[in-house]
Amino acid sequence: MHRRTFLGLGSALLAGAALGGWTLAKQGQQPLLLSARNDAAGRHYAVGYRLDGSQAFATPVNERCHDVVAHPSRPLALFVGRRPSTESYLIDTRDGRLLQTLHSPANRHFYGHAIFHKGGEWLYTTENDTREPGRGVLGVYRLQDEQLIRSSELSSHGIGPHQLLWLPDGETIVVANGGIRTEADSRVEMNLGAMESSLVVLQRDGRLLSKEQLPETNNSVRHLALADDGTIISGQQYMGNAGDAAPLLAIKRPGQAFQAFPMAEVQRLEINQYCASLAIHSELRLLALTAPRGNRLLIWDIDSSALRLDQHLPDCAGVAAVTEGFVVSAGVGRCRLFDCRTESIVGQPLQLPAGLWDNHLSMA
């Protein structure tokens, strides 16, 4: 059953449930899981939960959100509207107060992702220029008195930018340009015969440093994960024929070209040409991928490319690294914590609400 129709949402949490041997990061303070959820009636929420199941907040919002970006030093997070939303939501993560509904300017809409600069004063969002549909821009916003004020915009140097991240220097941005042109208020792909997907690296001032493409024209570079050493891994959504054997993961190691990441044919077929959320655990040198269309969670060793886990997980959604390994949410069923510190990866359900989670989560 898909998350859009799942109605079996539990009405209460088992607050304070025991988690056995899990240490759950910092002693005395569990990380805060931030994500977007729906309820059984289809209403949208920006939510924060501790991993013991205790709810920090569940704030109603007008539009469905996609990714969540936490402020680097203040108890704030932006819940970014899902394409083609014109709203995003700045939330106080202590109590869930809605501090601001951020509206995209005229002739722009959000593409679902954003990043705060390490200093905390500036925010960058991926956006569509609807006057030239698909022309990618990065909206630049300044945080002033708990309000984001648009300052300027940069070119994404591509079409349909989706996720963006900081490289380890904190001043250089990597952007996944999905290459798909859409109209102002639509999710309908308008250029599948002429896609221009790319991985772009640019300076904060917008100066282009590199632009690389995969050989398969219809391979849309969408989601990104970054290791502390600067290794970039992207997950693709293939928009060509169902029988095409397109590589769905790609890697750019420092100083090397952007190229396919080795994936066995059995896993390529399992994930049904669609990568959702990626996360890298830099200390354990592991990559985790959720593939909801294939109901799979996959984990690889980054350095050897060895597959560490191939787990059936119905409609798996967001994934994020924690001390032990990875937390994974789902559109159907329970969120899980996977301990990756030993050779055998072990998963355990978390006492969080079941189902209806969106495709991304962040830990703060």
Image: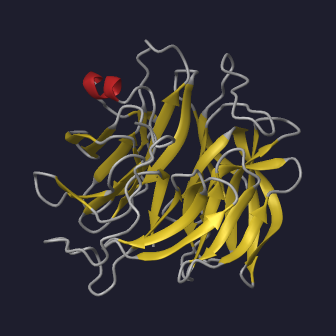
Q: Which residue appears at 16% of the width and 61% of the height?
A: 341
> Eyeballing the image, is 363 above or below 2?
below
Residue 38 as seen in the image, left or right of residue 135: left
The part of the image, by quadrant, that contains residue 190 is top right
> Eyeballing the image, is 304 above or below 335?
above
Q: Which residue appears at 69% of the width and 34% of the height?
A: 187
The part of the image, by quadrant, that contains residue 14 is bottom left
Residue 216 as seen in the image, left or right of residue 208: left
Quarter of the picture containing the N terminus is top left
Quarter of the picture containing the C terminus is bottom left
Q: Looking at this view, is 302 or 123 the one in front? A: 123
What coloring was used for the rendering?
secondary structure
Q: Position of residue 117 (x, y in %)?
A: 61, 70
> Eyeballing the image, is 227 above or below 53?
above
Q: Position of residue 294 (x, y in %)?
A: 36, 31
Residue 147 as seen in the image, left or right of residue 361: right
Q: Farthest residue toward the bottom?
A: 28
Q: Which residue appears at 44% of the width and 26% of the height?
A: 273
Q: Farthest residue toward the left?
A: 343
Q: Which residue appears at 32% of the width and 66% of the height?
A: 322
> Eyeballing the image, is 141 above or below 312?
below
Residue 45 as seen in the image, left or right of residue 203: left
The part of the image, by quadrant, that contains residue 265 is top left
Q: Looking at this view, is 17 or 217 the one in front? A: 17
Q: Position of residue 211 (x, y in %)?
A: 61, 39
Q: Position of residue 149 (x, y in %)?
A: 80, 71
Picture mark count: 0
